[in-house]
Every structure is written in structure tokens, then in C-alpha cells.
Image (cartoon, helix red, strand yellow):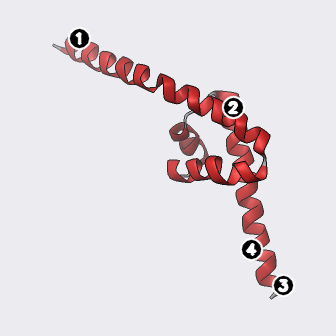
Amino acid sequence: MSARKSAAAQVSGTKQERCVSLALYIIDNGSTVRNAGKAFGISKSTVHQDITQRLAKVNPDLHRQVREVLDRNKEERHIRGGMATKRKYEELAEKS
């Protein structure tokens, strides 16, 4: 049983470390969930779960800081989408 318990502790420790690493990356870079997932090679669903659920338990102060960045990204999302659409149609006009 101790080997099982040890393996479970390693997995949760790894997830906890990943949560903190993700949080620091997002804060330092102002990154989105999608960009953080690409940088760490994990899905955006995993990033979201790590940040919203696990990090809140592991490090509440860091969780608050990440929430601020993610909330700001959410507020700016419609602007980034509009800019991408504008670029798309400018590029199409240049090709014509």
C-alpha cells in the first residue's frame, strides 16, 4: 500500500507544481488559457481546471492574481476577435 500512496502523492505533487507553473506563466506573460496550454503542451481544459480548481486550493493568493489576468483577457476577447477579422479581410483585399 505504501507504494500506491507514494505514487498518488507524486501525481498530486506534479499537478500542484503544474498549477503553480501555469499561474506564474499566465501572470508573467498576460497569457490566455489557450496560449498557456500550447506553451505547456496540455489542453486548455486542463489549464482551466488547474487554474480554477486546483490552484485555488494550493495557493489562493496566486489564484487571485491569475483570476485578474484571466478576467482582463475575457474583457478584451471581443476586441481581439474584431482585430483578427479586420486583418483577415485586409489580407483578402490585398490578394484581390
How far is disc 2 from disc 1 in space, using C-alphas? 37 Å
Q: CA distance from mark 4 to mark 2?
A: 29 Å
Residue pointed to by mark 2: 27
Q: Label 3 is placed on what type of residue?
A: Ser
Q: Earlier in the sequence, mark 2 or mark 3?
A: 3
Element type at mark 2: helix
Say whether disc 4 or disc 1 marks the residue closer to the N-terminus.
4
Residue 2's tag is 3
- The tag on residue 9 is none
Q: Point out the tag, 3 or 1, that comes first from the N-terminus.
A: 3
Q: Secondary structure at mark 1?
A: helix
Q: Earlier in the sequence, mark 3 or mark 4?
A: 3
Q: CA distance from mark 2 to mark 3?
A: 37 Å
The residue labelled by disc 1 is: 94
Task: Name the spot of residue 42 as percent of width and height, x first.
Answer: 55, 52
| Amino acid identity at mark 2 | Ile
Examine the image and state in which quarter residue 73 appears. Answer: top right
Query: What amino acid does circle 4 point to?
Result: Ala
